[in-house]
Image: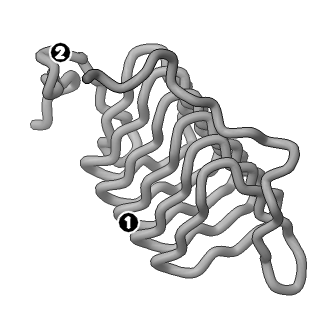
Amino acid sequence: MTAKFVSVEDDAGKVTRYSRHDNGGGLIAPGASVAESARIGPMTYVEHGAQVGSGCRIGHGSWIDRGATIGDRTVIGDGVRIGRGTVIGNRVHIGSHSRIGSSVLIEHGVHLDSDSTVPDGSEVIAGAHSRLAPARHRTHRKAKGGLAA
């Protein structure tokens, strides 16, 4: 039988206690919201503040960063990274091993092939061929403070 909770320590020594999602066994951080009907693959992490809509399927080994929002009936492949504060619409398909940056907006119905890369602050517009639009309306949030000297 698989444990209902898993404690994970990060590089800074902070321990987070994730709960396993009933449908697929993915790891859900406290403060994340995942619909019961969503399937979260094993070894997939959904971080604090992230929201996953109903009917979603997220593959094995993916990572949904803090504050990301995933719409209903979206399919995300294996080994996909969704950046902080990214918003993904309904019925989106993201192929395996893709990298979606922080503060990205992906419109409803977009299909991204495997190994796709979407830079921080971009907007992906739906159409006959999904295309990347310049990031005029969604600026990338910079971290507070500077680099240590």
Which residue, as the protein is rendered here, is positioned at the far front? 149
Relative depth, front residue between 10 and 136: 136
Residue 51: x percent and y percent?
Answer: 60, 31
Q: Residue at x 79, y 41 (%)?
A: 138
Residue 47 is left or right of residue 124, and the answer is left
Residue 71 or residue 85, whichever sits in front? 85
* In-image side of 121 versus 26 (left or right): right
Q: Where is residue 88 in the image (x, y as percent from the top left)?
A: 70, 50
What residue is shown at x 17% (from left), y 26% (from top)? 10
Q: Which amino acid does label 1 sit on?
A: Asp
Residue 78, label in figure = 1
Quarter of image, res 86: top right
Amino acid type, residue under disc 2 in the picture: Val
The relative height of residue 43 versus residue 11 in the rendered view (above or below) is: below
Closest to the camera, between mark 2 and mark 1, is: 2
Decide which of tag 2 and tag 1 comes sooner along the chain.
2
Classed neighbour count for the residue bearing mark 1: other residues with Cα under 10 Å, few (<14), some (14–19), many (≥20) = many
> Is residue 35 in view?
no
Depicted 69 relative to depicted 75: above or below: above
